């Protein structure tokens, strides 16, 4: 195997550097034998042609090695994650079977591979900024957060690799995904170094001129900046040493993207940036003294340099949702220049650098609370049912950025909300019932409306009324996706109750007037009255927006008109070419035979297919509708219009595909749709045309449209679908 066949000269150099870094990082996680075995699997896959360049010319092996090395550096080395990263493309290409991976590496690696393949399938089919991709990505996210760590680091790897890529459209596409999705996700997870580099590269590829201008300015002033930071740090080190604190001090300049952002907001050049310099003090303190030592260092620095109280950030008392802890102060240093100072311990620094991933590296540190908060944000969006991808991203961004407020209940309990949350959000957060009856609140002893925006430090007491009901306008007042979901649920419940009241009212009045209701006739009336759904009709009936007596009179008038039209016709009007099939000379319509002069159609109400017992019914237009003998409307047609009913049977098998609908009910599960569609795809001569799924409170209801040959094939398919884990029932519908 020739190396040159798979790498260019530059790629080979890059590969060797990343491979050395990866081996060094993994020496405590994987044995030499494990590394060699994994290398042989990858090498054999290359020889077999299973790791060819992708459609954009990206070398998959170089991408895997670079991503793995970056994962170890930015997030942390972990055996199963690195193994899954290398094996996922081999399983995806069909070179390896997932069962073989499971036998060799276990459940955890298989779980990660499935998550990686899922995200790859979503990206290729839907595009990373589509609503379905975003929703399904979050589902994978909620299942195993390590998959998101991998794809975020992979996005950084790709951004580094496409600097000189020949396809400008491809680079623009990747840059857009990173800017709108992966950089914000990195921020949310606390992967600040990755986020900063991703943002710098986004600026580089979207506005290279501005990027080069700032980079050139920073390079030209590097010597001066190094000297300035040294002059600032010198006195600080002396004071910290006097206080017997063990520490490390780092000085740096803001990222290019951060500088550009400030230039744009403040309409100034690089030289006018408010706090271009940043200094980080990392204390070697552990245990109970962590916070007190941080405050001690803060006190020493602010005694030396004047600080701006408005720019002070206390993430010690109230850590961010991703676990970030630090003290931030902006002070006036030498030459009256602003300097940002970050103070934290070694543990806090690793969490700040590696985000949520770092929590698992410290025994006894509980990250479940922060992770649960993040997962709740994800689930809120998934439950919202909104198909607009931009709205989903907007909702998600509410919790991505670090604008948060902290408020208290009257008992002193502390609650955290996204910036912009209202009294209504607070009420629904406590309990749905409290939110539904909320009329306002006493905030810090003063009465406020439900629109009042919460501020950090507020003490909030919710005011309620038994006569209060949720309103549609509340959807514009509530700030969080979770509150809006609860409001929508409450509004739907109110509408359903009102619709039930309307239905009961009509039924009672009909019964009082001894009118027997024909459901099909009533449905026609509802449609004639302009209602798109039956629920909308009953809702207006229950709300007294239409008069029930007027509806009854319209119904009776329509029935009378139907009766008069029917009397004008006689059974002799309907003639057809039929074929005698037995000695008793009973006429039957043979469906599928060579019939001339007969216009017949398959009825949509029951959707008959080859093999069903059927009969014909001559409609008022003269068309013969073919119904199943067990059609819900069969008894009514045969009783009221027996002279229009015709015996019918199927001709020999025609090879025609019949479209029917299956209704599937079961437990809501991420993999259940895949399992159902997999069974259908494996069935010979059965084709899945469409699928729709509705989920509610842990249960799902799906409607599958399938093209099928005959009743025997249908019965076999239904039996197999009923064996799928989680499926409770499968019933046949119409077309």
Image (spheres, rainbow, N blue to C red):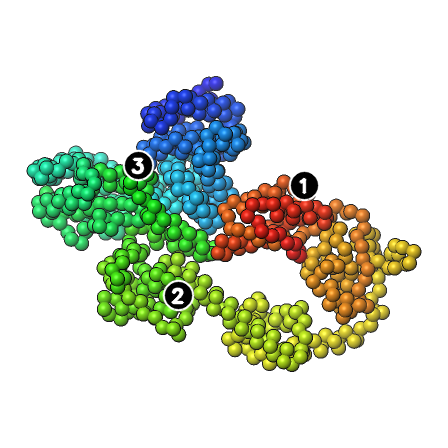
Q: Nearer the viewer, mark 1 or mark 2?
A: 2
Expressed as whole percent of the image width and height from the top left, the position of residue 701 reads: 56, 54
Q: Which mark is residue 684?
A: 1
Expressed as whole percent of the image width and height from the top left, the position of residue 49 reads: 52, 26
Quick one: label 3, few (<14), some, or many (20+) residues within 10 Å?
few
Q: Are marks 1 and 3 in contact (CB under 8 Å)?
A: no
Q: Which mark is residue 433?
A: 2
Q: Residue at coordinates 35% horizontally, 60% vertically from top-left?
A: 429
Sequence-first disc among 1 and 3? 3
Q: Which residue occupies the foreground of this view, 599 or 628? A: 628
Q: Secondary structure at mark 2?
A: helix
Q: Residue at coordinates 59% horizontally, 42% vertically from top-left?
A: 678
Q: Secondary structure at mark 3?
A: helix
Q: Residue at coordinates 37% horizontally, 62% vertically from top-left?
A: 431
Dividing the image into 4 quarters, which one contains the C terminus?
bottom right
Q: Which residue occupies the foreground of this view, 624 or 463? A: 463
Let me know if residue 721 appears in the view: yes
Quadrant for residue 569, please give it.
bottom right
């Amino acid at each position: 195997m020739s190396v040159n066949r798979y790498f260019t000269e530059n790629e080979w150099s890059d590969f060797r550097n990343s491979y050395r870094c990866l081996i060094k990082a993994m020496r405590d996680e994987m044995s030499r034998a494990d590394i060699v075995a994994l290398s042989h699997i990858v090498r054999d896959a290359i020889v077999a042609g299973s790791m060819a360049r992708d459609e954009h010319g990206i070398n998959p092996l170089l991408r895997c090695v670079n991503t793995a090395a970056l994962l170890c550096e930015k997030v942390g080395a972990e055996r199963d994650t690195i193994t899954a990263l290398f094996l996922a493309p081999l399983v995806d290409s069909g070179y390896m079977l997932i069962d073989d991976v499971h036998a060799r590496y276990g459940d955890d690696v298989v779980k990660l591979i499935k998550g990686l393949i899922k995200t790859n399938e979503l990206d290729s089919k839907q595009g990373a900024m589509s609503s379905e991709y975003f929703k399904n990505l979050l589902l994978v996210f909620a299942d195993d957060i390590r998959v998101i760590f991998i794809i975020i680091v992979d996005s950084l790897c790709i951004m580094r690799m496409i600097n000189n890529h020949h396809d400008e459209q491809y680079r623009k596409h990747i840059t857009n995904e990173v800017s709108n999705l992966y950089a914000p996700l990195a921020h949310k997870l606390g992967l600040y170094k990755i986020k900063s580099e991703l943002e710098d590269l986004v600026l580089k590829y979207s506005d290279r001129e501005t990027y080069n201008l700032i980079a050139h300015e920073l390079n030209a002033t590097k010597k001066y900046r190094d000297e300035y930071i040294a002059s600032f740090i010198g006195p600080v080190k002396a004071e910290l040493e006097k206080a017997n604190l063990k520490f490390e001090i780092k000085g740096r300049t803001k990222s290019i993207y951060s500088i550009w952002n400030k230039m744009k907001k403040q309409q100034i050049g690089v030289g006018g940036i408010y706090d271009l310099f940043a200094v980080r003090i990392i204390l070697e303190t552990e245990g109970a003294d962590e916070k007190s030592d941080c405050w001690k260092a803060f006190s020493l620095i602010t005694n030396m340099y004047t600080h701006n109280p408005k720019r002070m950030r206390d993430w010690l008392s109230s850590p961010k949702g991703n676990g970030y802890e630090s003290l931030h102060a902006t002070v006036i240093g030498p030459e009256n220049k602003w300097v940002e100072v970050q103070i934290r311990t070694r543990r806090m620094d690793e969490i700040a650098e590696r985000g949520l991933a770092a929590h698992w590296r410290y025994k006894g540190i509980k990250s479940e609370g922060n992770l649960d908060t993040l997962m709740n944000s994800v689930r809120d969006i998934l439950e919202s049912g909104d198909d607009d991808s931009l709205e989903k991203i907007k909702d998600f961004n509410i919790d991505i950025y670090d604008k948060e407020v902290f408020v208290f209940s009257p008992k002193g309990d502390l609650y955290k909300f996204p910036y912009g949350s209202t009294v209504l959000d607070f009420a629904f957060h406590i309990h749905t019932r409290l939110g539904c009856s909320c009329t306002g609140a006493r905030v810090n002893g003063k009465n406020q409306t439900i629109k009042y925006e919460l501020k950090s430090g507020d003490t909030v007491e919710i005011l309620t009324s038994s006569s209060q009901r949720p309103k549609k306008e509340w959807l514009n007042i509530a700030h969080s996706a979770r509150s809006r979901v609860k409001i929508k649920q409450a509004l739907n419940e109110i509408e359903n109750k009102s619709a039930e009241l309307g239905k009961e009212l009509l039924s009672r009045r009909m019964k009082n007037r001894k009118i027997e209701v024909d459901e099909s006739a009533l449905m026609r009336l509802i449609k004639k009255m302009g209602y798109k759904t039956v629920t909308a009709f009953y809702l207006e009936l229950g709300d007294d927006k239409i008069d029930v007596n007027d509806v009854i009179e319209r119904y009776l008038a329509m029935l009378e008109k139907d009766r008069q039209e029917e009397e004008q016709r006689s059974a002799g009007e309907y003639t057809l070419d039929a074929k005698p099939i037995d000695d008793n000379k009973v006429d039957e319509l043979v469906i599928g035979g060579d019939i001339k002069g007969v216009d017949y159609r398959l009825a949509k109400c029951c959707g008959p297919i080859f093999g069903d017992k059927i009969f014909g019914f001559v409609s008022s237009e003269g068309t013969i509708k073919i119904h199943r003998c067990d059609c819900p409307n069969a008894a009514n047609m045969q009783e009221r219009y027996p002279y229009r009913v015709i015996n019918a049977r199927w001709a020999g098998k025609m090879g025609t595909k019949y479209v029917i609908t299956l209704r599937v009910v079961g437990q809501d599960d991420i993999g259940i749709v895949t399992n159902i569609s997999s069974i259908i795809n494996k069935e010979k001569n059965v084709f899945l045309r469409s699928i729709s799924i509705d989920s509610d409170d842990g249960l799902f209801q799906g409607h599958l449209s399938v093209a099928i040959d005959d009743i025997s094939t249908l019965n076999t398919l239904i039996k197999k679908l009923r064996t799928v884990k989680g499926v409770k029932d499968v019933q046949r519908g119409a077309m």
